[in-house]
Image (spheres, rainbow, N blue to C red):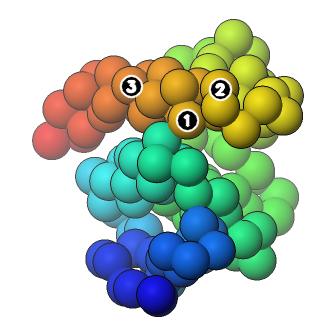
Amino acid sequence: MIRSTRWFIVDDDAKTFKSKRKARTLPTAFDKSIKNWELRTEGYQADNSVITCGLCDLFKRMNKTCLKCPITDYTGFRYCRGNIPYINYCDSKNKQIRPKLAIREMEFLKFLQSIYVIEAS
């Protein structure tokens, strides 16, 4: 079954999802990013055709990639590098562990959201 959410087209049979639209503001970028990781906690995988991270929607640009992204600002590293849960998720090939690692990334994003969205208000 294929269903549509605010941010994604979700294929429940294949357990995949793809981006439906881009986030345009910091609050919506965090919302989309967190929803992306909520799907991953349920065992879904992005189909890799389009960026599924709302923060990348806003901050991944040709010449100034990741500048001003809250993750870059917090870690000091561009391209989601540094000591963040995303790295462990990407490195893991274990399908049983990946949803648990996705929870950590989702919690990390919620933590950043609590800092950066309030500051932006």
Q: At label 3, which amino acid type do we have?
A: Glu
Residue, disc 2 = 97
Q: Who's the residue at 40% across and 73% down the image?
A: 7
Q: Give the SS element for disc 3.
A: helix
Q: Amino acid at mark 1?
A: Pro
Residue where numbered disc 1 is placed:
99
Q: Residue furthest top?
A: 83
Within the image, what quadrant is residue 67 found in?
top right
Residue 1, x across and y down, in percent:
46, 87
Task: Identify the residue under disc 3.
Answer: 107
Kind of element beneath mark 2: loop
Q: State if disc 1 and disc 2 touch (CB < 8 Å).
A: yes
**How far from the left and from the top, in percent, is residue 121?**
15, 41
Left/right placement of residue 103 relative to residue 89 reads: left
Q: Residue at x 25, y 38 (%)?
A: 117
Within-10-Å neighbours for mark 1: few <14, some 14–19, many 20+: many
Q: Earlier in the sequence, mark 3 or mark 1?
A: 1
